[in-house]
Amino acid sequence: QKLKIFKKWVIGKATLNELARETKKSVSTLQRIFKNFMDYPPLPRPDPNSNCHLTIDGTYFKNNFCVLVYCDNRLKKRQYFRVVDQECWYNYMTDLEYLKQVGLNVVSITSDGQKGLIKAVKDVFPKAIHQRCIIHIQRMALIYLTRFPKTEAGITLRYWVRKLHLVENYEQKYYWIAEFEGWCGKYDLFLKERSVSFSGRKWYTHKLLRRTRSLIKNALPNMFHYLDNFNIQKSTNGLESQFSYLKNTLKIHRGLSKENRESFVRWYYYFKGQN
């Protein structure tokens, strides 16, 4: 009974005051009950999988803590998560080494391309396929291009960037790549244009267009692996939506100490895993 009450509080279905009225217990009594649970949070229990396709992402919370989550697309299970201080190579490498030891063979990962994660995957699972998150590439490119580009090159590229998430087969893939490469060829000289200040300092006139081109070129080798295997997710959107729910729920419970926030996250994912 106590665990059920605690669960309603953690997943945001009731506040302390609402639970106090419902259970006819005082708020201080509920706080003492909840403290026992918060002092002993559950640990994630990964399931062995020799053909594991992971979606990996991290998110930051206020007061300098970060949650890294590893979701198994094939088993439809959150295999692991950990509260850390930051997204970095060491934290990702530590988690992947642990997952390897408990029986996960990672065949592919889907991520937003965080450099520390890419290096960690290469170190621990060197043969794993890396799928770049299509939505992340698209979002960053649209930020660089702005909502209303002022050049023909910008307008054209923005049109094709907005089509990126609609690629669902090989024909559409090759067509999209051909259009992008055609754009690169057509506007190559345009992108080399430089501006000069009165002091003689030079810079590329179309910096944001060049940045968008580099973003897509660097990601292109790893943009369409999801067409080869339906277990490979094309984006990390599923995890990002989970992060939004977690952050909104945690906002309800303002005032938790850092240790209690970490315990809260563990309990939150434990209960969500049951669902």
Image (tube, grey):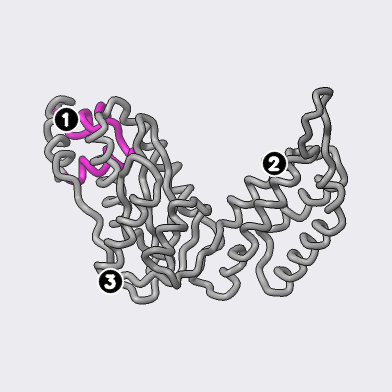
Q: Which residue is mark 1?
A: 31
Q: Identify which amino acid the numbered label 2 is placed on.
A: Tyr
Tell me the element at label 1: helix
* Residue 168, percent from left and from top: 66, 68
Callout 1 amino acid: Gln
How many numbered marks, from 0 up?
3
Secondary structure at badge 3 equals: loop
Q: Nearer the viewer, mark 1 or mark 2?
A: 2
Tell me the distance, in whole angstroms, between the alpha carbons under discs 1 and 3: 39 Å
Considering depth in this image, is 95 or 169 the residue closer to the camera?
95
Q: Amino acid at mark 3?
A: Gly
* Residue where numbered disc 2 is placed: 144
Residue 15 screen position, x and y as percent: 29, 31
User: In which image quadrant can residue 204 be found?
Assistant: top right
Q: Which residue is mark 3?
A: 103
Does the magenta-highlighted stretch encompass residue 148? no
Foreground label between 1 and 3? 3
The residue located at (19%, 46%) in the rendering is 41
Q: Tell me residue 68's x, y (percent).
A: 37, 49
The vertical placement of 60 against 183, above or below, is: above
Dot 2 or dot 3, earlier in sequence: 3
Crowding near pointer 2: few (<14 within 10 Å), some, many (20+)? some
Which mark sits nearer the N-terminus, 1 or 3? 1
Q: Quadrant of the C terminus?
A: bottom left
Which region of the structure is painted magenta? 3-25
Horizontal side of residue 265 vs 247, given as left or right = left
Label 1 and label 2: CA atoms lie apart by 48 Å
At a point 67% along the width and 72% down the height, the residue shown is: 169
| Distance CA(mark 2)–CA(mark 3) | 41 Å
In the rendered image, the quadrant that contains the N terminus is top left
Give how far across and how far down residue 196 sits, in percent.
83, 31
